Image (cartoon, grey):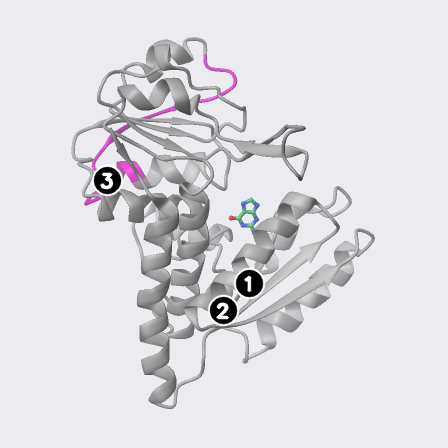
Amino acid sequence: MILIDGAGLAEDILQEIRQEVDLMVSNGKKRPHLAAVLIGDNPASLSYVTNKVKSCETAGFKSTLIKRDGNFSENELAQLIEELNNDSEIDGYIVQLPLPRHIDADKILLLIDPKKDVDGFHPLNFGRMAQGLPAFLPATPSGILQMLERYKIETDGKHCVVIGRSNIVGNPMSILMARKGYPGNCTVTIVHSRTHNIDEIVRQADIVIAAIGIPKFVTSEMVKDGAVVIDVGINRIADTSTKSGFRLVGDVDFENVAPKCSFITPVPKGVGPMTVCALMINTLKASKSEIY
Ligand code: GUN
């Protein structure tokens, strides 16, 4: 069993980006600049955004964190987005999800200039991704592709089962794994909360990508010997023995599943750091106008 070191890999890639940025700056180019919008006080969102800002520092980017309280209105957010779209100093930005319930996230995502949509959530980027055209790829699926590539994991002709159908992970992941090329060329099955025989289907998978948001959902009985298991889950469960009162567990019962796998990602230090890294890659691409 090989443990995929997402944290170490992300660090290596961030250093590669830093070298490129230092060279760009020494050649008189502008430092890439990412802005992050955080509305409300969801602790998990705050922790994700803080990580993104920290990674900007490591990558040599400028970053701006725009925090507004939970009463910030949809109209005010729309106005802020227009300002970010028109601000030539900012290469790319993200609006951290979930948004408070009084804000329609789909409406907001449509307002983001696709050229600055480094999360790849705008329907134009999603559609271009689905058609195999140059696009900003959503960060988590893109980070997973990087992992598969750097660990030289075979995907050609493999059966990939994606658990979960969210627009952020499951849905785009399934499209990317089926795309022509490497990593890709998989036969893909998506299973979700309404699937009747999830266990039986997951047992057939060469590659399992778990993104369902249920702690330890994938058990050892569901995984075939030699499978590659990618755990996207970041679930907070109560733990009185820790300072914070919680600990993070994935969607996979790691302890029992790991011995059966050829490759597996841990939680934390697996997919999470790669997601942030993929966002940095997109921001660098935005600053170089590589996609549009
Ligand atoms: N919420 C959970 N994952 C993400 C992500 O990748 N980007 C944003 N903006 N919000 C998220």
Q: Position of residue 1 (x, y in %)?
A: 24, 28
Q: Amino acid at mark 2?
A: Glu
Please state which of residues 243 and 270 is positioned toward the viewer in this rendering.
243
Q: Is mark 2 within 8 Å of ligand 1?
A: no
Q: Amino acid at mark 1?
A: Val
Please identify the residue farthest to the bottom as the structure is shown: 28
Name the element at disc 3: loop
Q: Which mark is residue 292?
A: none
Which residue position holds label 3?
184
Q: CA distance from mark 2 to mark 1?
A: 7 Å
Q: Is residue 95 visible?
A: no
Do tag 2 and tag 1 residues touch (Cβ < 8 Å)? yes
Q: Which residue is drawn at the image coordinates 43% and 19% (left, top)?
A: 218
Residue interval drawn in magenta: 177-195
Q: Which residue is drawn at the image coordinates 49% and 33% (left, top)?
A: 233
Image: 19 above or below 46 = below
Q: Is 121 positioned to the left or the right of 98 in the image? A: left
